[in-house]
Amino acid sequence: MEPMTERQADILRFIRDEIHSRGCPPTVREIARRFGFASPHAVTEHLDTLVRKGYITRAGRQTSRGIRLTQGVPNGIPLVGRVAAGTPLEAIENLEGHIDLPDHFGSGEIFAVRVQGDSMRDAGILEGDCAIIRLQPRIDDGAIGVAILDGAATVKYVFKTHQGYRLQPANPAYQPIEVSPDEHPDFRIAGPMVGLVRKMSRGFGPG
Amino acid sequence: MEPMTERQADILRFIRDEIHSRGCPPTVREIARRFGFASPHAVTEHLDTLVRKGYITRAGRQTSRGIRLTQGVPNGIPLVGRVAAGTPLEAIENLEGHIDLPDHFGSGEIFAVRVQGDSMRDAGILEGDCAIIRLQPRIDDGAIGVAILDGAATVKYVFKTHQGYRLQPANPAYQPIEVSPDEHPDFRIAGPMVGLVRKMSRGFGPG
DNA sequence: GAATAGACTATACATTTGTACAGGTCAAGC
DNA sequence: GCTTGACCTGTACAAATGTATAGTCTATTC
């Protein structure tokens, strides 16, 4: 697909945000207001360009709020791959994409992590699952949560110890991990796991 | 909430459908066209009533496509509780509600079943999970699927046998179920399980 | 029998909205 | 210097849109 300019990307982003937050694409003049344009024609030109480049379509001539996104609406929450050590969670190293899951898992900042390995197998959390996380540092003792350890997001039972934390797997083949602030200065609790989404393909045969 | 009349329910349903299919609520005149009204005012009255009864809100005076649903949009797929024996799946006995999951799990008719019991524990399918099913009679041998047995939907590994089917749990505490068409005339394959959605609350401590 | 509420027609009007025409600026490329 | 494309202003206009007023018909309720 033909690349956008920075300005065009801004406008596309605004349209996308409006669709998510208001449930309806904005009007031409709403876009103009947002960007401080004195004339709606500036928007029309950008929309024409975005149509030509294939990012949006229009639903008929003179149809109000007729902007439609061509690509699947990343309606949902960011799907995080790896988390850069020592950085706030916004600075995510590789964002795998988006997972489409509108407000099912309560309010607050929600994101998803793809589960690697089978260390939480006995808690019904399998490799490839998307763990849904609410971004919040507090977590109930013994609840399943996501912690950032050495730049990787790990799903474990999280227990508070007098030293720091114990990350307990749900698979006897794995050992619990004791975490102390001294040894792991980058360690952080991302938040409790509030849900799980699994997308199955073939090959899920009995063990 | 104050009950609707049949007509009002029709209109609310149309608004909901439009939001789902077009991603945007209809205009007053689009509703009038759909119901064959000669005057847009007929719609305005119905909308006023729906606002008064609390089913919708309006986004400002003179805002095009400003109808907003107050209740969470049942955007997704039906969540089936119990399935009546010997009936097509549309005739579901108790429909628990809707699960909000836009087209993640491929095309086709999709529905969800709440998992009861822990017979599929070792496949990472726990009690209370929502199993996402694609409605289709064919299923790969040994794949996880949902079968209708004695009016209840059960999630199991499904194997074809020369007699009929074997429903294999993923928990050694349970015995496989042999199904023959003679003994279980109502037996049906609903379809393969294509996904899973879990919504967690507190109390998911280690086993 | 009068009153009320739901449902709808007919017409009208101001606002909103998409679009068009005629320009202007500014940086990049030839 | 000239052209091109991205970007924006200013004005205008017709179509679309939400809303209002006035009235009709019907069934139900008091």
Image: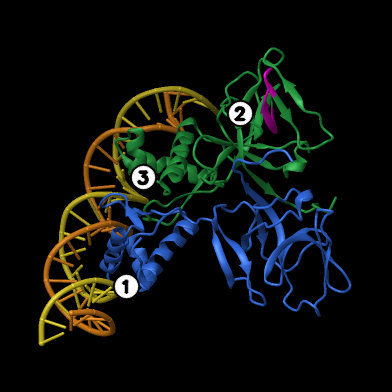
Chain colours: A blue, B green, C orange, D yellow
Provide the residue designation for mark 1: A37
Q: Do callouts 1 and 2 point to residues on the same chain?
A: no
Provide the residue designation for mark 2: B190
Q: Within 10 angstroms of label 3, few (less than 14), some, or many (20 or more) residues?
A: some
**Which quadrant holds residue A27?**
bottom left
Q: Is residue B67 above or below residue A160?
A: above
Q: Position of residue B193 (x, y in %)?
A: 62, 37
**Magenta stretch, residue numbers:** B153-165
Q: Is residue B185 above or below residue B24?
A: above
Between circles 1 and 2, the one closer to the viewer is 2
Q: Residue at x 79, y 49 (%)?
A: A122
Kindly check if marks 1 and 2 are in contact, taking CB atoms under 8 A apart as contact.
no
Which of the pair B156/B199 is nearer the observer?
A: B156
Q: Residue at x 48, y 42 (%)?
A: B50
Q: Residue at x 74, y 48 (%)?
A: A124
Instruction: From the image, give the main secondary structure of the stretch colored magenta.
Output: strand
Provide the residue designation for mark 3: B28
